Image (cartoon, rainbow, N blue to C red):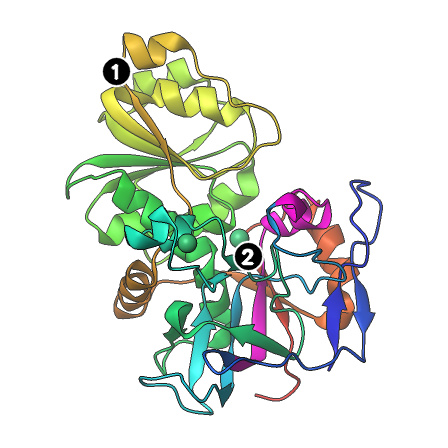
Amino acid sequence: MRGLQIVHFSSSPSSHPYILNPRIPVPPITSSQLLIKIAVAGYCHTETMVARGEFARMALHDPLPQIPGHEPTGWVAAVGSEVGGEWEVGMRVGCLNYRNPCGACEECKAGRVLYCPNMQMAGVTADGAMAEYMVADPLTTVRLPPSLTFESAAPLFCAGATIYASLLKASLSPGQAVAIVGVGALGHLGVQFAKVMGLRVVAVDSRSAPLELVQTLRHPPDITLNSSTTPVSAALAQLPFQVDASIIATDALPAYDYALNLTRRHGTVVVVGQPGEPIPVQYGMLVFRDLTLRGSVLSSPEVCREMIKVFTEHELEVRTKVYALEEVDALIEDTHREGMAGKMVVRVAEVF
Ligand SMILES: [Zn+2]
Ligand SMILES: [Zn+2]
């Protein structure tokens, strides 16, 4: 099969992280797995960290050569003999990246399989979605509604699931206010989910392109703030309401201080960004302002199903730019463009 592969890890920004290999063997499945024919795979910001080898220490086996991509969508191509339930060949599905949780560790026993240290993560610690076929775990595979295109669905399996779960972790009620700090791929989805949850939404970014994009959404934010031109003190002076919680969906370190200061006393700040450096937190934010700081990773399959229902029922949008497998170098170049906004996806299947 055709697919992209990382053949060696490199932290050089000028390196080409992937080769296009036309002769990768189709992966065999066990009796408890599904084989997915990939239609579209999302390109997530985490791909750059995978290509640098930052997750290699979490892999159960040497992952190289490794197929990238952890936002798979496609059709069920084969069903293992012991797989029960609804699965049929030809069904349209997407997959969360984690598979084969051990079932024996304390996390698995407590029902928190997302935190199982013995599982594999497609495209992160094992082969992923940017090839014609991928092995999937029925436990983390989700059926797609007919109205949802593969292009729109792919970004939901990491970006959508992550930002939706982080909003749930902020534990807000309708009428309260949330700041989405960083409105790129995750954030532009977060703005929409928050709006349809009945929240007031402040969209914050240091770049104008993503702020302009979110204002054109069917469910735009109430307020946009450009953090590079509006210091947080000025933002607080002009906001007509207090911000009850902030979601930080960027790796940019200045965003952390901005979000912490923007959030009201006793509020919650949820981190989904993954900066390479430690995040700066003044003790006063925790001691005198009593903020709760917490993190969030991906979502359970149940929350993912709920998120997809919300997405389709409210006709939310993912702004995507589509690339062919052969165009991955152009995709990577575009990630560095100033005007880049929305979400990049890779079309793997030639025919739909
Ligand atoms: Zn991701
Ligand atoms: Zn486990």
Report the front residue among 241 and 179: 179
Instruction: Using the numbered discs, state the Cα–Cα distance from disc 2 to disc 1 in whole angstroms.
Output: 35 Å
Q: Residue 197: percent from the left, percent from the top?
A: 21, 51
Asked if one can make out residue 318 in the rendered structure from this viewpoint, the answer is: no
Rendered view: 213 above or below 131: above
Amino acid type at circle 2 is Lys
Q: Which mark is on residue 290?
A: 1
Quadrant assignment, res 181:
top left
Q: Quadrant of residue 306?
A: bottom left
Q: Which of 306 and 79 is in front in this view?
A: 79
Q: Name the residue under label 2.
A: 343
- Residue 209 quadrant: top right
Q: Residue at x 49, y 27 (%)?
A: 255
Q: Give the left or right position of residue 339, taking residue 244 as reference.
A: right
Residue 341: where, in percent of width, then height?
A: 56, 50
Relative to 48, is 263 above or below? above
Image: 319 above or below 114 = below
Q: What element carries label 1?
A: loop
Q: 143 or 120: which is nearer to us?
A: 120
Q: Please state the extent of the stretch shown in magenta in the rendering.
A: 35-57
| Residue 239 place in picture, x, y as percent | 29, 24
Callout 1, which amino acid? Asp
